[in-house]
Image: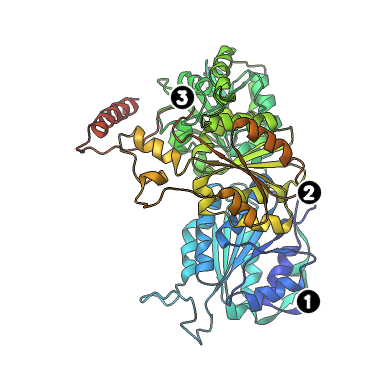
Amino acid sequence: MTTTRLTAAQAMVRYLSVQMNEDGVPFFAGVWGIFGHGNVAGLGEALYGIRDTLPTYRGQNEQSMAHAAIAFAKQSNRKRAMAVTSSIGPGATNMVTAAALAHVNRLPVLFIPGDVFANRGPDPVLQQVEDFGDGTVSANDCFRPVSRYFDRIARPEQLLTALPRAMAVMTDPAACGPATLAFCQDVQAEAYEYPDAFFAPKVWRQRRVRPDLAELADVVAAIKAGKTPVIVAGGGVHYAGATDALRDFAEAHRIPVVETQAGKSALPWDHALNFGPVGVTGAASANEICAKADVVIGVGTRFQDFTTGSRNLFQTAGRCLISINVAAYDAVKHGALPLNCDALVGLAEVTEALGGHKAPAPDGTLKTKWFAAVDPLTDAPADAKALPSDMQVVGAVQRSAGPDTVVMSAAGTMPGELHKLWKAPRAGAYHMEYGFSCMGYEMAGAMGIKMAQPDRDVICMVGDGSYMMMNSELATAVMMGIKITIVLTDNRGYGCINRLQMGTGGAEFNNLLDHSYHTQPSHIDFVAHAASMGAEAVKAGSIAELSAALEHAKTVRGPFVVVIDTDPYPSTPDGGTWWDVAVPEVSVRKDVNTARTAYEAALKERNAR
């Protein structure tokens, strides 16, 4: 056996550089890194040595760097990923939020935080978190509950087992999620004779799990027995590359499709069987179909509460819930009849077993009525001096979008408005982080999307609240020459939560900036701020000016930011369904007591089913 003497850090990055996906492309597109004393001497030197093969990108914040890596993986349908490295203290804990985001969304990313000295010689080192009762604990133990695989590299030879395990998790459709290799900083610099075979290129293929025959028979029988079936398309449809298979399945058996936030764009918006977004942020057309469905076929969805209306959406007595999901954990949620398999393979085998079976034709007028209700909401306001609504902003962006546009967002108002209103023409045209609903994902995420698909036109929709929370990667996008368009809607605070607060009987408090304990009114110049980081930025005083700015954005080479003031109160009144947000049982406020009465009635209705 031939060997090569390398430091552990050198061995790690060499191994990462030769891991391939089934398309013959390196699985790792690069490493995001902010260096500190816990990773600069070891990993920093190793990454420098391999920079032409495995590029290193520097961001401004560890969390937002990881957001960019996660968005890259999501837009790549998990076929590619990135690694993110930090030093041992706040840099590491900054990444924990991003790890949770990746964990919830089942997305691959490799976290490599520096760790304390394995030899404990200089303990306690700078930034070391000490547990008085456990000498093995460091700050990186925070990653344990939000990692699909966690390991601490305390000897150089441990990489021989830890790295393949991490790769196996990140490339497994069922177990996919973040892997964390906490890398002791002294071990990074230690040398070992690594077998040359360890660095041979390895191809990681997407596992296509076939259905169990008994489960398949049960599911086919249930579908045949149904009179009003519906398909709920989730993110797993995209990750399995099953969008065409979904279309063929729906058409073959005449079953309407509704889409979750992660599943949106699985079918083109104007496909006859696409009845639109489902759930709390859903369309009336989709939710009415679901309320009357006697068979609900989930494909690649975990039936999160926004999808099910907190388990209140599917109202038909005795209805059968089917879950086609590669993860057994998700396939049995809500007492579903499971079909634990890959979505692409599962749909093919179910349709073969169904033969010529067709469901009764769905009511196509539901779509017509929905668009008749909401399309006018996206028109420019008749009064050009009035503050535009978020719906009108979405309309302007939609009219400027082309077939290659990807619209993206995360938490706040825009996920609800975009889920309801955005007309996605093809797969991958809609990118929403709503599994973890993480504010601050937007701009770094937009950058990651563009890095994954440089030919796509990426438009980031972000509110002023999220922008204030995490905007520094705008400077990174400028320095890297990454072209993204940012539409910043300024409603002067957290408009979405303010509406929820009011909707549950609460007084407006601590959400909008002018309803907080501030002695000065809000006058944040977002245009100047974006320009100070090198972006071209303009203020749009109306929807017409926004439309003109979006046309100009197409000629700009780097990041372009357009800011528009919006009304924080209106939202799309149509569609949606109940969401379980607990209202206080006791209050001195009449509005809260009224909301509590309505809440108890909704709970009683749900629990009676």
Q: Is residue 7 left or right of residue 414?
A: right
Label 1 to label 3: alpha-carbon separation: 69 Å
Residue 578 image offset from top left, x and y in percent? 40, 29
Which image quadrant for residue 419? top right
Residue in the picture at 58% in, 14% down? 368
Q: Secondary structure at mark 3?
A: loop
Look at label 2 and name its amino acid: Asp
Residue 333 image offset from top left, x and y in percent? 46, 38
- Closest to the camera, between mark 2 and mark 3, is 3
Q: Nearer the viewer, residue 473 or 265?
A: 473
Residue 387, which numbered label?
Answer: none
Q: Badge 1: how crowded within 10 Å, few (<14), some, or many (20+)?
A: few
Does residue 151 lie above or below 408 as drawn?
Answer: below
Label 1 to label 2: alpha-carbon separation: 30 Å
Residue 7 in view here: yes
- Reading the image, the residue beneath label 3 is 573
- Reading the image, the residue beneath label 2 is 23
- Closest to the camera, between mark 1 and mark 2, is 2
Residue in the picture at 44% in, 43% down? 494
**Disc 1 vs disc 2: Cβ atoms closer than 8 Å?**
no
Residue 393 image offset from top left, x and y in percent? 58, 33
Q: Secondary structure at mark 1?
A: loop
- Reading the image, the residue beneath label 1 is 1
Q: Badge 2: how crowded within 10 Å, few (<14), some, or many (20+)?
A: few
- How many discs mark residues in the rendered view? 3
Q: Quadrant for the C terminus, please.
A: top left
Residue 206 in view here: no
Q: Quadrant for the N terminus, please.
A: bottom right
